[in-house]
Amino acid sequence: MRVIGIEGTAWAASAALFDSDADEVVIESDPYEPDSGGIHPREAAEHMGEAIPSVVETVLDRAAETAEGETIEIDAVAFSRGPGLGPCLRIVGTAARALAQTLDVPLVGVNHMVAHLEIGRYQSGFDSPVCLNASGANAHLLGYHNGRYRVLGETMDTGVGNAIDKFTRHVGWTHPGGPKVERAARDGEFHELPYVVKGMDFSFSGIMSAAKQAADDGVPVEDICAGLQETIFGMLAEVAERALSLTGTDELVLGGGVGQNDRLREMLRTMCEQRGAEFYAPEPRFLRDNAGMIAVLGARMYEAGDTLSVSESSVDPNFRPDQVPVTWRDGEESVARAPTTDGAIRGAEATVTVESGRVEKRRVPKTYRHPELDDRLRRKRTVAEARLTSQARRVGVPTPVVRDVDPTEGVIVFDYVGEADLAGHLTADRCRTVGEHLARIHRAGFVHGDPTTRNVRVGEDRTYLIDFGLGYHTGHVEDHAMDLHVFGQSVEGTATEPDPLLGAFEAGYESVGDDAVLARLREIEGRGRYQ
Ligand SMILES: C[C@@H](O)[C@H](NC(=O)OP(=O)(O)OC[C@H]1O[C@@H](n2cnc3c(N)ncnc32)[C@H](O)[C@@H]1O)C(=O)O
Ligand SMILES: Nc1ncnc2c1ncn2[C@@H]1O[C@H](COP(=O)(O)OP(=O)(O)OP(=O)(O)O)[C@@H](O)[C@H]1O
Ligand SMILES: [Fe+2]
């Protein structure tokens, strides 16, 4: 089977031919390079209008050459339907419809983000990996469950590449900035910047403001670049590890243009090695935007009968990966496998050993992280966890009694509580109780920071909150709502029927807490993040 792919969501005008029998992908791309500033949508669209027809022609010509006079049969035309810049997408859509009609073959509409991840899954042969997408306009963690890719975690503001590019614009470098930051960082010393993860979500805006400020203050730009890489990629590696831990899976796949960065790949590889997971990153031509990934996923969709008529083939600039009905995978597969535990329990951050009713939690150094950053995080989180675990109990939320703390070693000893994690024992009643617990700590002026179903222990008649290491004092509605969002995502990512559980959770919260927080949760969920 042969499928043509067309890509043009933002900067890469690209066409590809995937021959599934030979397992060969020919890609032809023509990048748009702005003279100054970032990507201008109108200029980018003009580029697509000129470049798409010629890259398509080149790919067809090359295929004709290899066929040596034989006619080459094309089975389908696949195109990027979104997300991306509207004016660019419309040109790609028009080109794809015209080509499909000329060749008289079906049209396949591909979600660009899902394509970034499926290419790695396809090439690695992994079954059901957690997928980290690190691209320009996006950054998220996906896991497949029940016929959909679920968003396990994502950026709360800009995409990772765009964040880096904004900094490089500030210091006067041309677009794209990512490769320049990578080069400059090699000559730099780590410069400390804010580090922001909330469960499996993360945000870049605070880091970018601090990086720009540091540049204005005269900190050597190489040092800021080193700080940016260590901080941003450290965050991505951490949330990826948390997703592996939450889902119990041991396969990670990387996608997206920022995935071309050696330091990011090195961190992810080291993180996976340290926890005995497998890691796969496609070669660079399949990481940055390219039509090869569109053709490969297009072929699988075509095989599954997932084609579009012209009238239903409109593009969608805000097309989210979790909106895609995954027709090409077995609905029974799932990333949410039961986690196995042997003697010592391995969380995302720490090793937990249980002995005679006591739990010792040790935040082991993470070798993928810069030592200074690692030291700072382990110490800070150990102190926060000990303090907030006790404060929560004082406001009526069941938590383990803290027996000992050693911030230098990153060790806490507390009582063993509950019989199992909530993850494998989700009920509406328990979720309601979690809602009440979170409302109580919010009223007391702090957040949990990582209230996933693995950080709730269930006993006969009580539900305990554990793992307060990411918690902090805050009265902001946004921070409180983020706690609810994190819990919601962990339920949605793993439960077969999340709705009744989340309904009970919110009812529990409402009975004790502030309505404004629930209203803000709706707002967070509705925010489009493709900026
Ligand atoms: C929607 C779609 O148009 C968008 N595409 C996109 O963002 O292009 P992509 O090729 O996946 O990523 C480009 C980004 O990747 C960054 N980048 C490229 N090489 C890099 C490197 N060596 N280190 C860090 N960033 C790098 C660039 O600075 C730029 O921000 C997306 O996938 O989000
Ligand atoms: N006090 C406790 N009583 C009973 N079990 C516990 C206790 N503390 C931790 N555990 C068990 O150990 C697991 C890991 O602990 P914890 O969540 O604190 O570590 P972590 O490394 O921060 O994990 P993650 O970041 O993945 O949430 C928990 O999911 C739970 O099963
Ligand atoms: Fe992309």
Image: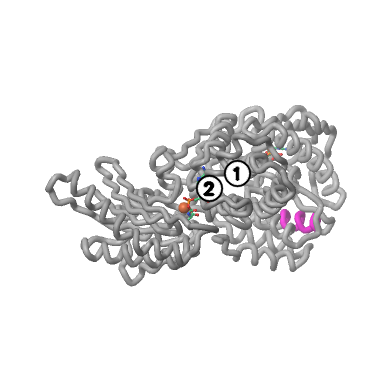
Task: From the image, give the main secondary structure of the stretch colored magenta.
Answer: helix
Residue 134 bears which disc, if any? 2
Indicate if the residue with disc 1 has its beta carbon within 8 Å of ligand 1: no
Q: Residue furthest right?
A: 394
Q: Position of residue 126 (x, y in %)?
A: 43, 38
Neighbour class for label 1 at 10 Å: few (<14), some, many (≥20)? many
Q: CA distance from mark 2 to mark 1?
A: 8 Å
Q: Residue at x 80, y 43 (%)?
A: 384
Q: Is residue 220 above or below residue 426?
A: above
Mark 1: which amino acid?
A: Leu
Instruction: Determine the residue positioned at 39% across, 40% down.
Output: 123
Does residue 477 belong to the magenta stretch?
Answer: no
The image quadrant of residue 185 is top right
Which is nearer the eye, 129 or 417?
A: 129
Magenta-drawn segment: 433-442
Badge 2: residue crowd in 10 Å (few <14, some 14–19, many ≥20): many
Which residue is depicted at the point 14% across and 51% down?
A: 71
Q: How many marks?
A: 2
* Residue 493 appears in the picture as rendered: no
Circle 2: residue type: Ala
Q: Which residue is mark 1?
A: 236
The response on whether ligand 1 sits within 8 Å of label 2 is yes
Q: Residue furthest left?
A: 69
Foreground pick, 107 / 175: 175
Residue 116 in sight in this render:
yes
Is the C terminus in the top left, top right, bottom left or bottom right quadrant? bottom right
